[in-house]
Amino acid sequence: MRRTVAEHRSAVAGLLRWSSGYDGSAPEVLPLVEAQGRALAEDLRAPVSLPPFDNSQMDGYAVHADDLGDTAALLVADAIPAGSVPPPLQPGTAAPIMTGAMLPDGAAAVVPIERADPAQFHSPAERAAGPVTVRLPGDAAPGLFVRRAGSDIAEGATALPAGTLLGPAQLGLLAACGVGTVRVRPRFRVLLLSTGDEVAEPGTPLAPGAIYDANSTLLEAALREAGALVTRHRLLGDDPAVLQEAFAAIPAGSTHLVLSTGGISQGAYEVVRQALADSAVEFSSVALQPGGPQAHGTLSGIPFLGFPGNPVSALVSFEMFLRPALHQLTGSPAPRPVLDAVLVDGLDSPAAKHQVRRGLYRDGKVALVGGPDSHLLHALAASNCLVHVPAGVTALAAGDAVEVTLTGPVPTDPFAVEDVLVLEDAATDAAGTG
């Protein structure tokens, strides 16, 4: 059957949600330093207020409430360093106070040292010689340069909601709140298989007619980047009986998903399709280029997805279907940035399919890298985005607007004429070899 991209995306998300058993998995408790990139399993409330006490925002003088607006000389009290608990501030005095130091009782504001007269703190020698004074401007308002306790977050308030992805800023907040460990959602487990008699392991001699297995490395890297825990199965050939045995040997509860590549199209040697002919796996055609052939269903209750065997098709399938489903279910990975861009060059697209081209995005523009063919790995490696051409659009010209999904870093320098020419030459060469 033929599905739209949206229909198949929904089907994959539903399959994982209802059949993977992931939602019933117990959270993991990790130290903060090991929790980066993971999603919180539950709301986390602040055990303390931030700041935990009123403190100074500047190096300066703490001023008593009674002395605000008074320009008379004030007796300089003992200095207040950060980390100390100061005595109450008396009227008629001003205390040198450091940034972050606790504000003494009675103080209502902090005057920066550069606004004081003199505009520097008295030296120890001056203090030792006898009492010293300071004059402060009369326009200091209550609360000037004071960080109030709880002004960042109050004790008991939600610091981070469940599902939050923990990056440096989030982990820094938790550390500041005194949190040492967090309960995070478990990693999503994937068993990854690749099929084909012609496929050889990288690093081994390549026999005539054979190709190296790119899909296992490509998809394992993509899954790990998305936060999944991946187990790679040994390479499987084109014997349906061997594949059936491999599927039957998967222990129940050992994985949340079985993912295979290759063997699902309409050819004479589509081993996955043959091995699963009588299973609960559905083989369908999605209105997508590349990545039209797709398989999804369950094997003994375990979710199964089958991606096409061409490497670009496999990665496009992951980005279009599996990665969004993982985000919905586990909170990790974060959604890809989706941007509007202007095409540097034109393109043609089949009317009935959503075409996904590879491109290089920067400075609001996107140049196509390589053609639409699904074997152009060199072009894929040179790209940093997927360029979307919706079904029903048959051609776009240079200067037209398109939607792109960022998959890699964006160069900071703008496109130059020579850059565009190099990309166009690469696209021409790739199309000529396709």
Image (tube, helix red, strand yellow):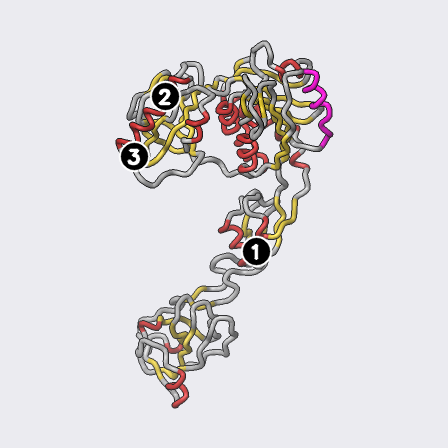
Rendered position, 388 above or below 169: above
- For label 3, the residue is 415
Left or right: 100 in relation to 134: right
Rendered position, 367 above or below 283: below
The image position of residue 285, as x and y in percent, is 53, 15
Query: Can the viewer see residue 27 in this picture?
Result: yes
Identified at 61% across, 18% down, the residue is 197
Q: Farthest residue in the bottom direction?
A: 129
Left or right: 313 in relation to 422: right
Q: What's the amino acid at mark 3?
A: Phe
Magenta stretch containing residue 241, yes or no?
yes
Q: Quick one: quadrant of the C terminus?
A: top left
Q: Which mark is residue 429?
A: 2
Counting every numbered tag in the picture gives: 3
Query: Can the viewer see residue 92 in this picture?
Result: no
Left or right: 25 in relation to 294: right
Which quadrant would residue 195 be assigned to in this image? top right
381 and 228: which one is in front?
A: 381
Q: Residues within 10 Å of mark 1 (few under 14, many from 20)?
A: many
Q: Which mark is residue 207?
A: none
Looking at the rendering, the stretch of residues picked out in magenta corresponds to 240-253
Q: Which mark is residue 46?
A: 1
Identified at 38% across, 38% down, the residue is 410
Spatial distance from mark 1 to mark 2, Cα to Cα? 58 Å
Rendered position, 230 above or below 432: below
Is disc 1 placed on a helix, strand or loop?
loop
Q: Nearer the viewer, mark 1 or mark 2?
A: 2
Q: What's the amino acid at mark 2?
A: Asp
